[in-house]
Structures are given as C-alpha cells and as structure tokens.
Image (cartoon, rainbow, N blue to C red):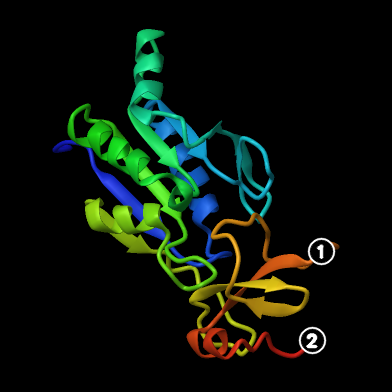
Amino acid sequence: MRDGAQLKFFYGPMDCGKSTLALQMNYNHARQGRRGLMLTRYDRSLGARVTSRIGLSREAIEVTDELDLRALVRRHWAAGSRVDYLICDEACFYTVDQIEQLVDLVDVHDVDVYAFGLATDFRSELFPGARRLLELADEVSRLQVEVLCWCGREGQLNGRVVGGRLTREGEQVVIGDTAPDDGEIHYQVLCRRHYRAGDLGPRV
C-alpha cells in the first residue's frame, strides 16, 4: 500500500539518461492507469517536448518563470482531468519557488513528483532549483548510466566549450548539446581532474 505521495529527484551529468528515464517512468505509470503531466524547461529541441538523445520524445508543458505549478494542476482538476503525478524534466532550471510548489503538491494534494535534471552548471556550482530539490526531496538518486570523460574516467561535470576552449564565465543557462555542431557553443562531460585542468582531450 502506498503511504502518501513522494518527491523524487534523479540527477546526473549530461548524457546519463535522465530524459530517457523520465519518458520511461511516464510510460510505466500511464500503463497502470495513472494520469500525469509531463513538464520541461529548455529542452534541447528548443520546443515543448521531452526529448532523449536515443531518439525518444513526447510533447510536454513548457515551464516558464511565471508558471504556477499548483495552479496548473488545479486547472486540470477543474476541467475534470485527474493528475496523479508530474514528470518534471530539466527541473534544475525551475525556479526555487516552483520547487516549493512541487513540494506543496506532494504534501498537500498527494500528487507524486518525479524530477530529473543536472545538479551543477558549467562552473561546477549547484543550480538553485537543483539545490532546493536536494534539500527537500524524499528520495535523491544519482543515475547509474556511466558517462565517460575522454580519458575513460567517470564523467562528473558539464564543461561549456566556446570556440574550442573550456569556459567558466557567462550566463548560467545557455542551451546547447554535447555534440559539436556549426555553432561555437557546446557541452562536454569531463572527469573532475580534466574539468579543473580545462583539458578537453585530443582533437578527433
């Protein structure tokens, strides 16, 4: 028997499968007859979708600074729709107030919340939303899908690469992916040693 709703936070570096797990969890819950909402912010697709690098995707609600998550759920209830759970992808980018709203939905309204996101930014500092999740979540899990640095060690930190060099200056949130493209900004997962040294490895 379930004993109340829970807030669970799943985190890890880029490429560790967070969005894939979010999509899988939504599928598993929906298959058992539960009704939920999928939310995201700053998805790599630049659209209102949860997308995975292995090719899975699903439409989602885009979270903005102005969105009140409690009011969102209440609107669905008022329209006659059940909301048993929320899948919150890229939750590290939510505001601290929105994390508090998620806690209210769990504690007051018995809505399960499954949050997925990065813990730290390109400067190796906690995102404010991730920090609050780490402080308040009922359960915190570092994802076990192994992401490797170019040297073969476990990748821990997300380096921002601008013009071929690791940078530690700039806006906290700049959308990019882990694959270099025609743009000059992308991200590379590094072990702590090579992140601190700013060593991006040999050019391929």
Picture layout, residue 60 above or below residue 89: above
User: What's the residue type where badge 1 is placed?
Assistant: Asp
Occupied quadrant, residue 142? bottom left
Comparing 89 with 186, the one in front is 186
Task: Identify the residue position indicated by label 2 in the image.
Answer: 203
Residue occupying the far top of the picture: 79
**Which element type, helix, strand or loop, lies under badge 1?**
loop
Which quadrant of the view contains residue 105?
Answer: top left
Which residue of the protein is positioned furthest toward the front in this rendering?
170
Position of residue 102 in the picture relative to residue 138 (left or right): right
Q: Amino acid at mark 2?
A: Arg
Q: Which residue is located at x 28 percent, y 41 percent?
A: 100
Q: Which mark is residue 181?
A: 1
Q: Is residue 88 visible?
A: yes
Quarter holding the N terminus? Answer: top left
Q: Residue at x 81, y 64 (%)?
A: 181
- Tell me, for residue 21, which label it has, or none: none
Specify few, some or many for label 1: CA neighbours under 10 Å numbering under 14, 14-19, or 20 or more. few
